[in-house]
Image (cartoon, grey):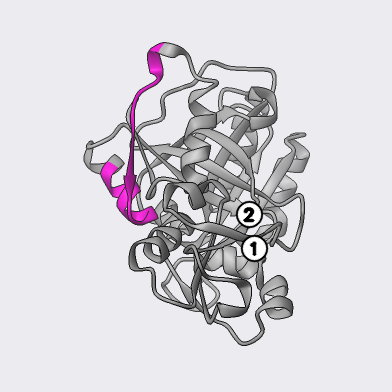
Amino acid sequence: MTYAYLGPEGTFTQTAVRRLLSVVPPGRRGPHRPFPTVPAALEAARRGEVEAAVVPLENSVRGVVPATMDQLAAADMHINAEVEVPVRFALMAPEGTGPADVTEVLSHPHALGQCEDWLRAHLPEARTRTAASTAAAAQEVGRTGTPGRAAVAAPAAAELYGLRILAAGLGREAGAVTRFVSVAPRWHHPARTARERTSLLLALGEGGPMLLPDVLQAFRARAVDLSWIQSWPTGEGLGRYHVFLDVDAHIDSRRLRLAMADVEALDVEVRFLGSYPRWSAAS
């Protein structure tokens, strides 16, 4: 398979691709191509330029990634795999720049959010500016060499873009993790394991959030465990939401099929996004 990922080289997403490739059969491994944004990577998969796109879905500190949520809600795409990557940040700058010289810090919004406490404590006068990815921030700082500029990125990005690490361990939580998913136009029906996850997208329709307790009860009554629930606006008006669900069962499970039928009987549209091994099983 050829994978698209949020680039450039040195992003946490590229690490996710490499982790994913380490557990797929050798015959399914292929090259991976960087794209400047999450929507661009997903659009490449949608058009058939690549077979799948690996994109960040949620972070244990900053929550969901809006660009990925928007694309999953709007397009007929499917999740075929997931992978988790520990997130460690470093402050890096061109040679000759010290911490006291830093006046502007570039990074991805999630990275800046996770490091805001450290930046406030150690660089209170420095401005922050967002970039498409942590590696894009490091690449720009290394390319321009503008005095006073630094980037927050994965430590590996420093060597890639000719930067020096000024400080490491910037994140708010030492155990921060980002969950990535492999998304493609078609569901590939991965080989089943003992630990399966199914992702669903629910459209609550006219009933809106008032239907949510009944939806949750439908899964509980069929003994289907939910591991993740996330509301996402439809864009059609206040109070109108999609609901993303992860359940710990395979789509071929009878109890999950019955639960889905119960939910649909509530006049809730259920869209299947994919069944795949939970990362803890693959790792």
At a point 42% along the width and 53% down the height, the residue shown is 161
Tell me: 261 left or right of 2.
Answer: right
**Residue range of the region highlighted in magenta in the rendering:** 27-44
Of 20 and 116, nearer the camera is 116
Task: Say which mark, if any, is on residue 272.
Answer: none
- Mark 1 and mark 2 in contact? Answer it, CB < 8 Å: yes
Residue at mark 1? 62
At a point 40% along the width and 59% down the height, the residue shown is 136
The reply to whether residue 143 is visible in this rendering is yes
Q: Magenta segment: does it hold 186?
A: no
Q: Identify the element where label 2 is drawn.
A: strand
Name the residue type under label 2.
Asn
* Quadrant (top left, top right, bottom left, bottom right) of the N terminus: top left
The reply to whether residue 270 is visible in this rendering is no
Give the quadrant of residue 170.
Answer: bottom right
* Quadrant (top left, top right, bottom left, bottom right) of the C terminus: top right
**Percent position (x, y) of residue 68?**
46, 54
Residue at mark 2? 59
Tell me: 111 left or right of 48.
Answer: right
Of 206 and 27, nearer the camera is 27
At a point 74% along the width and 63% down the height, the residue shown is 172
